[in-house]
Amino acid sequence: MIKRILVPTDGSDNSLTAADYAVTIARLFKASIRGLFVKDVKILTGPLIHDIGTSIGGMVPYGTFNQTIREMLESQADAALTLVEGKCNQAEVSFSQEIREGVVSHEIVKSADDCDLISMGKMGIHAEWRDVFLGTNVEFVVRQTHKPVLITPAEYKPFTRMLIAYDGSIFADKALKSGAEIAAVMKLPITVVYVADKKDAVLEPLSKAKTFLESYHLAVDTVAKEGTDHAKAILELCNDEDEKFDILVMGAYGHSKIQEMILGSTTVRVMRYTHCPILLCR
């Protein structure tokens, strides 16, 4: 069960949307939220800052310049965490905060050690100026943590219907359990999709998933998809406007690194192109 949710924040709109989703889940599970701000060591000690500090050294001593950057990050941390705290207070959700210094993605993973869920925005504070699909920290966190990670889009929408992508793997079983727990508390109907090269190969895994979900007393249906491009099949169903799925749940990085290099990662492609929040488990 979910008792503590970690919300990494940088004060961006995307991170605040992640906080909104976390608050929704926390209220229903009677869980607490920990807001986390990481003072990025790359900003504090990176070569760009060192070069700038050195170049203006004749006007401002480097130590003074570095202290100014630290104070700016402290102010940013206070502002960002205050916004998350405000959302928690409004919803009567218990809140605590933590400020760390280091490599952002590494510190998120460390802080999540005693949490049950991480909720973080797909993009960070400079998303509007970056020609990238994912925030720089998201993929690292998903790969390194063994906690479920909820990756959220820019806009908040209430959960009404859940899609679980299932392939029978250990990570998919974890995703099935996590999705079922959330759906049971939120009373969400579930659709389970299985993608295989041949349709007759999907019957056993789908039957296994449906049997597991019976004890949760939820409305469950199953979908069998045929094809070799699993990410494409999942995305076509998940992003279908007629289906109206509000959350996708799946296991993360089920293949070996060699397979990912050759075939590409289903996890990364789905993270990049799904329109709704995605809960990843490994």
Image (cartoon, rainbow, N blue to C red):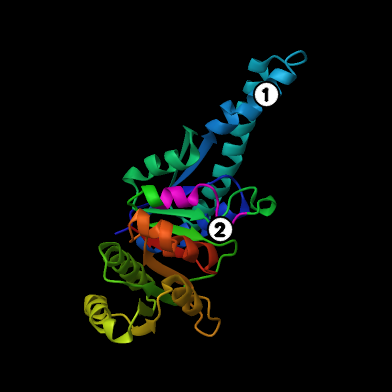
Nearest to N terminus: mark 1 or mark 2:
2
- State how far apart marks 1 and 2 are (Cα): 35 Å
Q: How many marks?
A: 2
From what the image shows, is residue 165 above or below residue 79?
Answer: below
Q: Position of residue 122 (x, y in %)?
A: 54, 56
Mark 2 surroundings: few (<14), some (14-19) or many (≥20) residues within 10 A:
many
For residue 126, side relative to residue 182 (left or right)? right
| Residue shown at the point (27%, 66%) measured from the top left | 169
As drawn, the residue found furthest toward the right would be 59
From what the image shows, is residue 145 above or below residue 281?
Answer: above
Q: What element carries label 2?
A: helix
The magenta segment? 132-142
Q: Can residue 6 be seen in this view?
A: no
| Residue shown at the point (51%, 37%) measured from the top left | 38
Question: Which quadrant of the figure contains the N terminus?
Answer: bottom left
Mark 1 surroundings: few (<14), some (14-19) or many (≥20) residues within 10 A:
few
Q: Is residue 11 one of those drawn in magenta?
A: no
Q: Where is residue 96 in the image (x, y as percent from the top left)?
A: 44, 43
From what the image shows, is residue 98 above or below residue 263?
Answer: above
For residue 138, side relative to residue 109 (left or right)? right
Q: Nearer the viewer, residue 142 or 253?
A: 253
Tell me the kind of residue under disc 1: Asp
Q: Name the residue under label 2.
A: 17
Q: Position of residue 258 (x, y in %)?
A: 36, 55
Q: Name the residue under label 1.
A: 51
Question: Which quadrant of the figure contains the C terminus?
Answer: bottom left
Tell me the kind of residue under disc 2: Thr
Circles 1 and 2, Cβ within 8 Å, touching? The answer is: no
